[in-house]
């Protein structure tokens, strides 16, 4: 296992250096003011172009990665499985935190404090819920793009910088659209990155005759498939159930 982790780090150190530099800046900034104050400040530069840009890019943390993974699996089953299992593990961890900690969304918190929200984006429905921490879209896009970085040929390692910047832009879209706070995005990105490492070890770890989970046969890796697919179903079901419940609550009020 140690050799597998070292191999992963050697091939992805640019990705991790880039991650910790940007992540560290975000963490440092989060200590410059309160959660509400930093959210208002980060939403002080809305423009029509940025509204459209972040509405589009935020979809990379939604269902889009699952569609892309499905297409990818048609050409490379093992690497596609790696990306899919990463989504499953990441979803389980994220949802446990979300519904255990039950932190309010920006709209919910601002409403309870009697403070007006910063500029919002037309066509974006604001969540009135207690499932803000961490950001599911952010963890989803980070485990997806970090997974892509891990399976890229080594000669294309310079693309890791682009992938990481793109992931953080997607995470920032959740703040820009007032769906999450900065802390939600920072912790969600960390979950996504850690989930990638866990998944890499599960899928590519070799022992005793260079046999790994994928090459050992479908019967052995059927369980990870089921776990991954079940986690995705649970994630979407929780979101749907929460949305229906919250809409009915708002209507009754």
Image (spheres, helix red, strand yellow):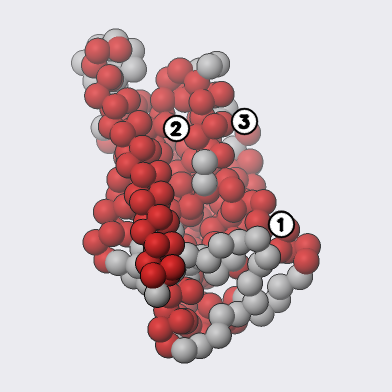
Q: Residue at x 31, y 34 (%)?
A: 230
**Residue marked by disc 2:** 83
Mark 2 neighbour class, 10 Å CA radius: few under 14, some 14 to 19, many 20 or more: many
Please, what secondary structure does the residue beneath circle 1 have? helix
Assign the C terminus to one quadrant of the image: bottom left
Q: Are marks 1 and 2 in contact (CB under 8 Å)?
A: no
Mark 1 neighbour class, 10 Å CA radius: few under 14, some 14 to 19, many 20 or more: few
**Sequence-wise, which precedes: disc 3 or disc 2?**
2
Give the mark toward the camera: 3 or 2. Answer: 2
Q: Which mark is residue 155?
A: 3
Assign the N terminus to one quadrant of the image: top left
x and y percentages locating residue 8 in the rendered image: 41, 36
Q: Residue at x 28, y 59 (%)?
A: 99
Q: Are marks 1 and 3 in contact (CB under 8 Å)?
A: no
Left or right of 216, for residue 174: right
**Residue marked by disc 1:** 53
Left or right of 156, for residue 253: left
Between 146 and 139, the one lying in front of the other is: 139
Q: Are marks 3 and 2 in contact (CB under 8 Å)?
A: no
Please, what secondary structure does the residue beneath circle 2 have? helix
Q: Is residue 7 visible?
A: no
Between 72 and 151, the one lying in front of the other is: 72
Give the mark toward the camera: 1 or 3. Answer: 1
């Amino acid at each position: 296992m140690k050799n597998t982790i070292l191999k992963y780090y050697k091939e992805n150190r640019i990705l991790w250096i880039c991650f910790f530099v940007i992540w560290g800046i975000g963490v440092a900034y989060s200590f410059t003011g309160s959660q509400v104050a930093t959210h208002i400040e980060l939403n002080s530069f809305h423009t029509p172009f940025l509204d459209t840009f972040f509405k589009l890019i935020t979809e990379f943390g939604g269902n889009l990665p699952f569609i892309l993974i499905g297409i990818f699996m048609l050409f490379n089953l093992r690497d596609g499985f790696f990306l899919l299992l990463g989504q499953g593990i990441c979803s389980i961890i994220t949802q446990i935190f979300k519904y255990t900690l039950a932190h309010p969304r920006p709209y919910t918190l601002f409403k309870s404090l009697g403070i007006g929200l910063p500029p919002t984006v037309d066509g974006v429905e604001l969540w009135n819920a207690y499932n803000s921490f961490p950001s599911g879209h952010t963890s989803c896009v980070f485990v997806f793009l970090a997974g892509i970085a891990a399976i890229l040929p080594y000669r294309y390692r310079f693309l890791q910088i682009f992938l990481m910047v793109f992931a953080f832009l997607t995470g920032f879209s959740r703040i820009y659209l007032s769906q999450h706070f900065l802390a939600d995005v920072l912790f969600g990105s960390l979950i996504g990155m850690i989930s990638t490492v866990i998944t890499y070890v599960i899928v590519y770890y070799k022992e005793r005759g260079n046999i790994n989970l994928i090459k050992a046969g479908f019967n052995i890796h059927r369980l990870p498939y089921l776990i991954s697919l079940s986690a995705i179903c649970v994630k979407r079901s929780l979101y749907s159930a929460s949305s229906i419940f919250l809409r009915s609550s708002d209507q009754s009020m």
